[in-house]
């Protein structure tokens, strides 16, 4: 993007050519250029991406914890459910 801007292209055109921004961000850049508030809108874009990254990190941590708990046998079955030891014959227990 730097090269495009140094050549005098608009930030919007350079951002479009970079093909890394979603349509919402491109719209925010367009509005920022038109209104002269590009600094404020780019700050909003940065905060939006920061929230997305924070959410993805939290989601990855939740997924990792769930996988880890299952892998190490720490998964807690649903309400009222109990783990049955592997050596228990469920058919025989149910008859009693």
Image (tube, rainbow, N blue to C red):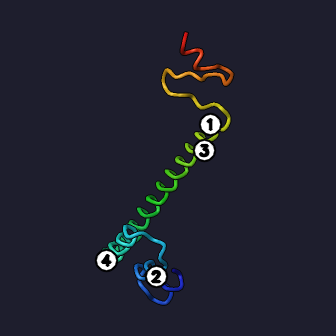
Secondary element at image label 4 = helix
Q: Residues within 10 Å of mark 4 (few under 14, many from 20)?
A: few
Q: Which quadrant of the structure image shows residue 74?
A: top right
Q: Nearer the viewer, mark 1 or mark 2?
A: 1
Sequence-first disc among 1 and 3: 3
Q: Nearer the viewer, residue 82 or 6?
A: 82
Sequence-first disc among 1 and 2: 2
Q: Residue at x 68, y 35 (%)?
A: 72
As drawn, 22 above or below 34: above
Q: Is the C-beta separation of discs 1 and 2 under 8 Å?
A: no
Q: Which quadrant of the structure image shows residue 69?
A: top right
Q: Residue furthest bottom?
A: 7
Q: Nearer the viewer, residue 25 or 63?
A: 63
As drawn, 11 above or below 56: below
Tag shown at residue 17: 2
- Residue 31: image x %, image y %? 32, 72
Q: Residue at x 63, y 20 (%)?
A: 89
Secondary element at image label 1 = helix
Q: Nearer the viewer, residue 68 or 10?
A: 68
Tag shown at residue 70: 1
Secondary element at image label 2 = helix
Q: Which residue is mark 4?
A: 34
Count all numbered tags in the image, as a single digit: 4
Q: Residues within 10 Å of mark 2 (few under 14, many from 20)?
A: few
Sequence-first disc among 4 and 3: 4
Asked if residue 68 lies left or right of residue 41, the reply is right
Tag shown at residue 84: none
Q: Which residue is mark 3?
A: 64
């Amino acid at each position: 993007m730097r090269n495009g801007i140094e050549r005098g292209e608009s930030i919007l055109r350079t951002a479009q050519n970079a093909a890394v921004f979603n349509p919402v961000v491109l719209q925010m850049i367009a509005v920022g250029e038109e209104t002269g508030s590009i600094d404020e809108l780019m700050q909003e874009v940065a905060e939006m991406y920061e929230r997305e990254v924070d959410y993805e990190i939290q989601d990855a941590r939740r997924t990792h914890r769930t996988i880890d708990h299952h892998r190490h046998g720490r998964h807690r079955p649903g309400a009222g459910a109990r783990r049955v030891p592997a050596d228990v014959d469920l058919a025989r227990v149910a008859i009693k």
